[in-house]
Amino acid sequence: MANAIVSQSGGPTGVINASLVGVIEQVVKHPDIDKLYGAVHAVSGIIKEDFVDLTNVSSETLEAVAASPSAALGSSRDKPDTAYCEKILEVFKKRNIEYFFYIGGNDSANTCKIINDMADEVDLDLKAFHIPKTVDNDLRTTDHCPGYGTAAKFVACALMGDDLDNRALPGIKLDIIMGRDAGWLTAATTLGQQRDDDGPHLVYLPERPIKIEDMIAQIKEVHSRLGRCVVAVSEGIRDTDNVVWAKKIKEDAEVDSHGNIQLSGSGALADFLADKVREGTGVARVRADTFGYLQRSFAGLQSETDVDEARRCGRQAVIYSQDNDSGSVAMKRTGQGKNYAVELFLTDLANVAEFTKELSDNFINEAGNGITQAFKDYALPLAGNLPKTDFFSQNPKV
Amino acid sequence: MANAIVSQSGGPTGVINASLVGVIEQVVKHPDIDKLYGAVHAVSGIIKEDFVDLTNVSSETLEAVAASPSAALGSSRDKPDTAYCEKILEVFKKRNIEYFFYIGGNDSANTCKIINDMADEVDLDLKAFHIPKTVDNDLRTTDHCPGYGTAAKFVACALMGDDLDNRALPGIKLDIIMGRDAGWLTAATTLGQQRDDDGPHLVYLPERPIKIEDMIAQIKEVHSRLGRCVVAVSEGIRDTDNVVWAKKIKEDAEVDSHGNIQLSGSGALADFLADKVREGTGVARVRADTFGYLQRSFAGLQSETDVDEARRCGRQAVIYSQDNDSGSVAMKRTGQGKNYAVELFLTDLANVAEFTKELSDNFINEAGNGITQAFKDYALPLAGNLPKTDFFSQNPKV
């Protein structure tokens, strides 16, 4: 018998706690695991030995936690170096930890891999498993990531409301959506579209660098045609020289330990673009909203599919740890549309670590400013049921 | 028999369509009303004679519209002058309009009153009724306003998620909330609090002007004590000289036809405050989000109480028009807590027009930076059921 550690890393999501609950409820069925430690604030909690006992948790608490957004154990942006990882392994030895379950994105998969490799080198018995999560949906190998469906549902509902708002008080509306390297979440703003002229009418993605002048011309064209224009813009939008606009407009922009520039938690990009668009189109009513942290942590809004899959991924990591040494839990889609279903499988940590996955080419329109039906077919089952909206566009004029 | 006009004015809300549906479904029962015209984009639709026939609408469409955010008929920010109102009365004569139902805020009540007074002067038979709506909850006479409960639910759920996010990745988080003259919606950010240390930890309202240095000192104190701090700030926050900060930081700020400075649709205030707080506290992780239009138009999120009351107000305006000449529909609270209930009554248009209502003194704490239990008792029934959240704070450390 040995002990296990579970922790959560990187940006919170609406269902990362469901994965945690999946681990907790499966560990009690694992024949070789004694105690389950929850590391508080990820790797930093491990080296500080700041652990919560998760061996026995009431099902009432488990259900409440699974329904709550954000990371119940706390998170961290630390990027462990060699000395940091050695410290982690010392704690593992001291606490008789032989199982490590790490819920996070590609950086976390990389940390998991480094720790596992170091354990191998010093012949420490360790089984290290990564459980995917990210609202960005940009992990490789897996069909999609737990956390994405819920964030997709949020931005879809937001754009449905925002598009109706823009019908009521017409003008140009820009919405800045999370996703530094990939446009998956920005693309999801289109999922609630019901009518041909429902916004967003233009979608700008990190995968398609664009000159601001071209963007303004496209917005102006839509506004002339419809009398209004709703635009979804990824926070990772970049100029044709491939430098993100957020960096161009703020040269001293904050950078985290992974070298990522700080994009969320500021309205600077939105305000910059709104000023440019107002100036370039001559339209008086230009508004811009930055969705910020609402997209990843909003209480009471989850995609049922997403929360279910997140929990399954957590459970499956524990099941895999019975017969495998390490890996990342991934999903394969086995049914489409109304028959949507996934199967879980285990993939090497190296297949998920470090690099990210861009939005597929067939999901982006030819003009590079919109989303295809193929994307909607892919993403709608993940967001789950979306509300329907209506107004009196069908009623006769008198 | 005469005809009726209904229209929607000012900023959209999550339930202004429910009030519209209330009018539509009650008009068919009114003995003296023949046709119901929906004026597209409020008063501007009246003078352009841009009308939708709302006399016969299927119950399926009515239910879908009642569940949709934003103003189904379109809205307007026009402030009619005398010539504009004369034009309106001409259209009323031409179209045999004797009933005018206007859903809006205090500016709309004022427009309704001016048109009604002018009709009286020229002996035009007109019954003009105002149906209240505003996410700002700042109309006089009524206990609260349709639209507020739904927006309150949104900001409460947002802050619940945001506070958990801030527990996961601690720092200082500022959230800018709608409400130019009154702090009702900003106060509602506290409604989801379940634990003593749940944020928002500080709440800044237009009713309590404050120097930025004092605000920073208070934030610093909370951050030192809890290791984190979540702050809700009204977009109408002002300095002790009573000038709103949004105006101070942008001297050329946009002003609408009612003389109101444009506050939403820009992240400038949030970014300004975040920079000041970062500088003044020395805390590295300071983030700011501006909730913007999400608060008033988010598909699929309504307070059940709010949508029900909004619909009742619409129906009641039509009922009042049988025996009264004009007025605004208002609500009186007849039951508290679990016995929460309201009765509708008719009040003079003058009692709602022009001026707004501030947050009551007993709803604000003595320090002027927080909300009292009395406010929560007032507002919780309006927001309806809020989700519960949990994490493992109760589990023992090991």
Image (cartoon, coloured by chain):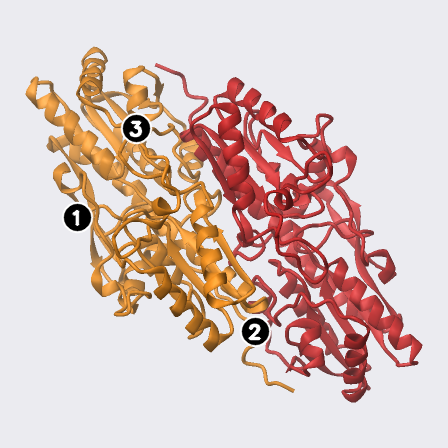
Chain colours: A orange, B red
Q: Chain of mark 1?
A: A
Q: Residue at x 20, y 23 (%)?
A: A81
Q: Residue A171 versus residue A397: which sits nearer the camera?
A: A171
Provide the secondary structure element on which disc 2 rests: helix
The x and y percentages for residue A370 are 33, 66
Contact (Cβ within 8 Å) of mark 3 with mark 2:
no
Crowding at dot 2, Cα within 10 Å, few <14 / some 14-19 / many 20+, comes out as some
Q: Residue B63 in the image: state x and y as whole percent.
A: 58, 68
Write the residue at 64% across / 58% down: B307
Q: Is residue B6 left or right of residue B250?
A: right
> Which amino acid lies under the numbered mark 1 shown in the image of this protein?
Thr
Residue B172, how many percent across, how many down? 49, 30
Identify residue type, mark 2: Thr
As shown in the figure, which amino acid type bears the numbered disc 3?
Ser
Q: Residues within 10 Å of mark 3 (few under 14, many from 20)?
A: many
Question: Tags 1 and 3 in contact by the CB under 8 Å rule?
Answer: no
Residue A338 seen by the camera? no
